Structures are given as C-alpha cells and as structure tokens.
Amino acid sequence: MTTIQTLWWREALTLALESLLSGEDLSGSILIAKEVKVWFSLRRSIIELVTRKPRKYVRAVDGISFSIKEQETFCLVGESGCGKTTTGKALLGLVPITGGTVLFRPKEEILKILASLGVNHNNGFVEISRLPPKVMRVLRREIQVVYQDPFGSLNPRYTIRAVLEEPLKIHFPSMSPEEREERVLKALEEVKLTPPEEFLERYPHQLSGGQRQRVAIARALILKPSLVVADEPVSMLDVSLRAEILELMQSLKKQVGLTYLFITHDLAVARYICDRIAVMYLGTIVEMGDARRIIEEPLHPYTQALIAAIPEPNPENRFRIRKLPIKGEIPSAADIPRGCRFHPRCVKFDENKDVLRNCVEKEPRYIIADGRVVACWLYEERVRS
Amino acid sequence: MLEVRDLTTRFYTFRGVVKAVERVSLELNRGEVLGIAGESGSGKSTLAWSLMGMVPPPGRIVDGSIVVDGIEVTKLSDAERRRKILWKKISMIFQGAINALNPVYTVGYQLAEPFIYHLGMTKKEALEKAEELLPMVGLRREVAKRYPHELSGGMKQRVVIAMALALNPPVVIADEPTTALDVIIQAQILNLMKKLKTERAISIILITHDLSVIAEMADRVAIMYGGKIVEYGPADEIYNNSKHPYTQALLNSIPRLRGPIEKLEFIPGEPPDLINPPKGCLFHPRCKYAMGKCRIEEPELYEVGENHTVRCWLYSR
C-alpha cells in the first residue's frame, strides 16, 4: 500500500462527479450510485403518535455509493438482511429511493428516445432514481433482472413462448409476429435450450429448475439490455447445475458485452465470476475492491469473519473447531448501532478499545487505497501513525 | 450403533412407483459421523425419514432391516416404535429455520414435551429439565420462555438441536441442519455440533447437498444418486481419492475459496426419473465414461480400497 489517501467518501464522490461533469474519465462506468438510501417507515402505535415520538425507519439501504464499469461483473455480497437485494431493487426502480442519486448511461438510441420524452442527460448519464414510470419503462429495455427463484419468477399459466414474447410486445408493439418468433427462438438458442421449437409451447412446470432459470435469463436478455441485475441466480439450484448456469452467464456476457450486477451471499461463487466485490453489512458497504484481493486479504473485520466461516471441501476440517472472529448476532435494521455499525460485533474493537473511541461515536471514513475501499477506523489509525 | 441392510423405500403414487431408496446398506459406529450427500431427488431425505420410521404416505418401507442399538426397528408397530425408539434411541435435527417449531408454544414447552411423554415427568419438572438443556447449546435459560418467532434463525436451530438431544439418544440424524442459515451462523452451528459430538459421543448421520458442510463433520461419506449409494468410504478417500465419475464431477463443481481458479465442471443433463429409471447404471446418461455395458446392466458396489466401495463398471473385476 504505497499511496494511501484518506477521503470522506462523499468528497470522493463529489470529486468523481465533478470529473464526470468536466468530461473526465468516468466514461468507463455504466452506473453510478451515490449515497443511495432506501428506508421503510414503521407504523407508529397510538401512544407513539400521541406522545409525538419521531417516526422510526427500517434502514434497509443506508447510504451506499459505488460505480459499475462497463462490461464488468460487480458483486454485492452479504448475509441475509444486509440490504443487497433491496439495493438491486432500488436500482431497478422497483422500490422508491429515499435519498441519493443513481446515474445510468444508456445506449445512444435509448438516449434519443429519452430526449424526446424530455429527459436530459449529462455526458450520456441519466439520473434514474426519480423518473416517472413512463420514462422508466423505456429504461427497462436497458436494465433487466434475473431472480433467485425460477419457480416463482415465471408465470405458471404462461407458455415459454408467452413468457418471452411479453417483453417484446410491450417494448416493440409494432414488431411483426414472425419477427417476434424469430427473436424468441434465437433467445432460447442463446441459453442452450435446444431445439428451441420444442420448448415454445411448454409450461414452466414441465421444465427442470436449471431449464427454468435459463428461460429467466433468456427473458432478461431478449430486449438486449446493457445491465442485468442477477439476484442470487444460482442459489436455488443443485450444485451440479450451478456451475453450468454460471458458465452460461459468463459466455453470454462475453458474447453480447453485458454488464452484471451480481447479488450473492456466497463469496466462493463471487470469486469465480466477479471482477469487483462490495461486501455489505446492515445497509452499508464495508469493503469494496478487486474480488480476488478481497478474498485473499480481507481488511475489514466483518469480511474476515465472513471468509473464516465458509466451509471448504477438505476433510481435515472435521478435526478442528473453526475460529470465528465475530460475536453476537446481527442487529435489526430498525435499530442500527451508533458510530460504526459493526462495532458491537467486532472483535478488533475489543482488542483496541482505547484507540477506537471513534468506533462508538462516528461512522467510519472510507479509506481509498489503490481502488480499495474499507469502512473501518482501524485503517484510519494505521494511516495516521 | 446403527446397522441398515438393504433398505428399500418406495412411494406408490398415481403416476407409478417411485423407487426413492433402493437397497441401501449403512453402518454407523459409536461417536462416528456419517455424511450422506446427493442432489435434490437423490433420496437422501427419504432415507432419513425411513430410518426414523416416519416415511410419509404414500411411501413405505418395502424391504430391509434397520437395527438401532440392537433393536430391529422395521418389525415394531408404530406405537412401540414411538415408545421405545424415537427420541430415546434415535432422533432427528430438522431444518429449524423452516417449520420444525410450533409457533403457538413456548420454546421451553416444546423442549419439555419429550420428558413428559417419554419419562413421565410432571410439567414443572419437565420445564426445569428443558431449561437445563439450553446452556448446552449456547443459549440463555430465559430463552425457554420465548416463542419461536422471537428467535433468530441460528437460535431456532440451536433449540432444534437441544430438542434432538433431550433424551440422550445414541444416534442423531441431521437433515440439512444448516441449509437455510447464513455462513457465519452455519459455522457456529457446525462448531456446536462438533463439540456436542465429542462431549457426548453421539453418532450422527449428516444429510446435506453441500459437500463442504459434510467435510466439516463426517468421518465417513456416502454419495447417493437416484436412490442408491454410488460411493461409500472414509472421508479422506472420498475427497482426495474419489472413484465414481459422479463424485468426481460433484467435487469439481464446487466453487472454492482458495487455490487456483479453474473452470468449474458441471454435470450435463438432469437427475433420473425414479418412476422410469434408465436401464443399466442410473448415471450413464450423464456420465462421460459411459460404455456399452453401462447402458444394459446395473453395476454392484465394488471394493476399491479399505472400506471404500464404488458402484461403477470401471472398477469391476
């Protein structure tokens, strides 16, 4: 670590944004999320209303910032309840964003359509977090999604043909039936469901889990999007099928030049397919950077615990008790601890109590060292001394 | 401790007979952990239910013997089995996070039930006994007064483990005990199970689709495919010197955290239909070494090493 700069992340982003506005190089990015927040308000009881208690929120996503480069696979990794799925939904415009901005760079042709709808862009970037539904619908051609559960994400009463034709009918109403069928067949071929004609008239329940997930991928790709949000696409599949779907996603990415936002709880899967990883904890990113480097040398105490906990197919492990450098359980997102939100569970915090007063008082700064981001006071201290 | 011979369980459905478990033989010694791995639909859960004698209809045990601690289980009537075997001799750790706990009773009451019904304790004694169980699995005694919905997934799983161990059974079956849990909690539960295993010298059958989890616990491993055991041997042998093409492919399909990043292998095709299983070896349609013989005749389990058997023609002599 030669050149370590400490910056408030906000400052860093302002810088990034300024550089963007001044036409400098952020052109490699396709999506920039800045301080994105998704809060859900909790209902207050009558007593709380009468006593004028402030409204409480579940802070599912609490100020996260990242950018996704074109044609990379960017991973959000974390345990259940850390806000990774909500982040994905927020970017897709499926849950309202409470605060922050999302900038997205669509293709030229989409930009033209957007311009005709009166949406301005800045160097090709469009602010997509607060667009009216009509405009968002145009953008859906550019951002598509693959869900975890192939049993739930396909309508059981639609044939595969109907599932795949629907997006075309919505987005290209003038397309002729022949052309539509051609696109559908091609999409099925691309996800290796061959011969495609055989699958057209089948219903989802007639397919196996792996085949259903292929249909879900075909549906996402049929509109030729630039960005695909893949929310745990292989978690429900058997191990032997997982590798096949991951392989397929990788080859499609190369073929069409896709960008993935890959959401997973499994760091081992992330290692195989992701370029960069952001590790999330309780609604924030605690560590972000190159996938392999994070797994080889995790800096944040939470990432370290997460990696220590992953079982490996090595029978020697049965003779040892795993050391887990973490304590307690994950707090509720409605009641996030003050200061660093990880400090009540942090083992490093116990070891360095006197040095780390900051942990209980202030949220950690983000340290940026060769493209790596760590939200931990420990590294702040290390930099200063 | 436990001896299973030629256990066969079938489901008699309208569409045909599902051969869920076919002639499975296993042995389990005291203090040993046996891991059973396989894909969904390989019959591993049906095997667990069969061992407990609780195969849901329309399924039933057709053939074979199960001897637990010297008692032949398949010959017993339901009532006898409930009285003599279940919970006392053999118990099951369910997937706690899903629905193993009754939402309308406190945790304490649910833990106390085996003491009331099996040992004839009064409710008060039983509740006290139940509270004593909780520290063993790393929970505070107060948890007994709580309801399942007040607990996190990891805590629920601990309660389910405490329940299974309440009457000190020598054999415990754990069916996907960590599947719905986050990695950190999974590691904590596995640590707990390792600790309890050595402290109380219980024998565990660990059933999961995750070979990494099995590596954390098992001394011996059985790989199931299409209701049959295709490879059976000591853990070191299975992981470092696997013989069956299915086991090899399964191991190569696991994304690993360390070491070189090789291309992940996958197994083309789908698991066999157990109503109309393919002729010959069940794995031959997906096997890259399939020969003429594989398509016609089914292989037996062949010995390839000490206590290591493989159901594959490649190793027949």
Image (cartoon, rainbow, N blue to C red):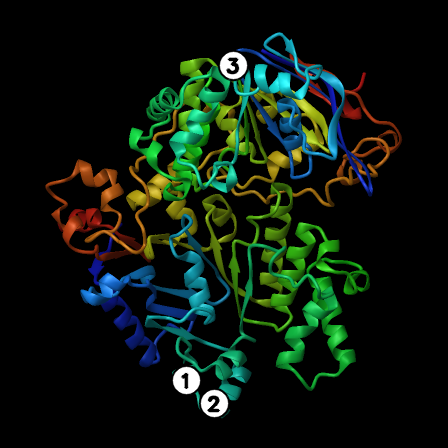
**SS at circle 2:** helix
**SS at circle 1:** loop
Q: Which mark is residue A115?
A: 2
Please tell me which of labels 1 and 2 falls first in the chain.
2
Contact (CB < 8 A) between labels 1 and 2?
yes
Residue at horizontal 74%, vertical 65%? A159
Q: Amino acid at mark 1?
A: His
Q: Amino acid at mark 3?
A: Pro
Percent of width and height locating residue B148? 41, 40
Contact (CB < 8 A) between labels 2 and 3?
no
Parent chain of label 2: A
Q: CA distance from mark 1 to mark 2?
A: 8 Å
Q: Quadrant of residue B245?
A: top right
Q: Which mark is residue B170?
A: 3
- Residue B125, compared with residue A85, is above or below; it is above
Report the residue marked by disc 1. Answer: A121
**SS at circle 3:** loop
Q: Is residue A313 visible?
A: no
Parent chain of label 1: A
Q: Relative to residue B99, is residue A45 drawn left or right?
A: left
Percent of width and height locating residue B63? 77, 20
Residue at horizontal 42%, vertical 57%? A84
Q: Quadrant of residue B151?
A: top left
Circles 2 and 3 on the same subunit = no
Percent of width and height locating residue A172? 65, 82
